[in-house]
């Protein structure tokens, strides 16, 4: 996997997501059997990326000729308001504009580091700790949208939130015209993350949770059980998350992040 040149690497802290079962900083294991599909570069234009169903308040910027686009978000979804407990952040997601598959998949980072964002601007994090424990099942403090607070009072998910298009809004109602699950987010390697429902006749997903189709190129699908978002990353180039940490005292108590 290609890494970004030093000038693109984040200078800020990466948000740390609280782990109910005490996950460590080790990388999650890559699934043993991984068959990658043929995955040519999927070219996109900035206009196409900007036309995704982003929530209000999220900006998508592209510099001419740049290989990456920049998504800026507070990480506070429209159905919530920033409070002392739930702090607005300065998230910046740098995402490859035209992703392509690598020769082998890469593991996700630690469960405390996001590996993508949903279209409502909220980051999502790995659901499995290095021992393979399902952190979603032990996530006691998640709200009805499956979000919870991490260090710095940042809001995040480990699943495709049912509220990605708004609280009470049915994700299935946003499906594409052909019935394919809607695009709900982006992985940091640039490939799209779609809602769990797949059209009849689509190939089964691989170990990373994605598949290649003629209409959409390579893309991931969320799932109702682990890994919920993606299990590993297939992209040859990985983006970056810059994060200007806001760490008010209330968010750094000895008992960890506040409860929702
Ligand atoms: Zn699909």
Image (cartoon, helix red, strand yellow):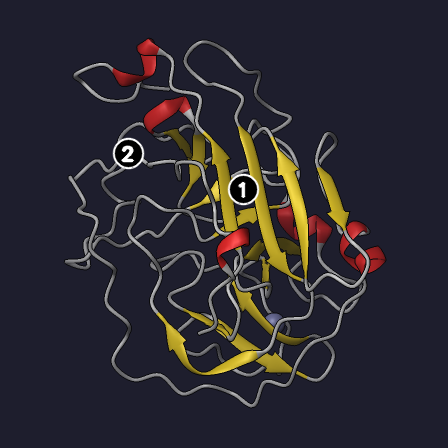
- Quadrant position of the C terminus in the picture: top left
Q: Secondary structure at mark 2?
A: loop
Residue 100 spot, x, y in % from top left? 59, 77
Q: Which residue is mark 1?
A: 162
Q: Are marks 2 and 1 in contact (CB under 8 Å)?
A: no
Q: Which residue is mark 2?
A: 18
Quarter-of-image position of residue 18: top left
For discs 2 and 1, the disc positioned in front in the rendered view: 2
Question: Residue at (53%, 64%) from the top-left corner?
Answer: 189
Residue 142 spot, x, y in % from top left? 36, 31
In this rendering, position of residue 121 left or right of residue 136: right
In this rendering, position of residue 179 left or right of residue 227: right
Disc 2 from disc 1: Cα separation: 20 Å
Residue 215 spot, x, y in % from top left? 74, 79
Residue 188 spot, x, y in % from top left? 52, 58
Q: Secondary structure at mark 1?
A: loop
Quarter-of-image position of residue 165: top right
The verdict on label 2 being within 8 Å of ligand 1 is no
Marked residue nearer the N-terminal end (2 or 1)? 2
- Quadrant position of the N terminus in the picture: bottom left
């Amino acid at each position: 996997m290609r890494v970004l040149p030093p000038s693109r690497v984040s200078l800020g802290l990466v948000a740390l997501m609280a782990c109910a079962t005490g996950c460590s900083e080790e990388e999650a294991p890559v699934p043993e059997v991984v068959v990658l599909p043929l995955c040519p570069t999927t070219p996109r234009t900035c206009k196409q990326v900007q036309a995704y169903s982003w929530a209000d308040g999220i900006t998508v910027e592209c510099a001419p000729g740049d290989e990456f686009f920049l998504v800026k978000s507070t990480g506070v979804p429209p159905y919530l308001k920033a409070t002392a407990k739930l702090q607005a952040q300065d998230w910046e997601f740098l995402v490859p504009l035209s992703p392509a598959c690598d020769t082998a998949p890469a593991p996700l980072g630690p469960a405390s580091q996001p590996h993508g964002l949903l279209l409502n601007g909220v980051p999502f994090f790995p659901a499995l700790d290095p021992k393979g424990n399902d952190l979603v099942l032990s996530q006691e403090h998640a709200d009805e949208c499956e979000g919870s607070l991490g260090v710095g009072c940042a809001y995040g998910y480990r699943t495709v939130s049912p509220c990605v298009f708004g609280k009470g809004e049915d994700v299935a109602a946003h499906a594409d015209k052909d019935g394919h699950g809607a695009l709900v987010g982006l992985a940091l390697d640039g490939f799209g993350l779609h809602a769990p429902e797949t059209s009849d006749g689509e190939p089964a997903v691989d170990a990373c949770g994605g598949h290649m189709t003629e209409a959409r190129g390579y893309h991931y699908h969320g799932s109702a059980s682990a890994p919920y978002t993606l299990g590993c990353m297939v992209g040859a180039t990985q983006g970056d998350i810059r994060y200007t940490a806001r760490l008010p005292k209330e968010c750094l108590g000895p008992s960890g992040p506040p409860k929702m």
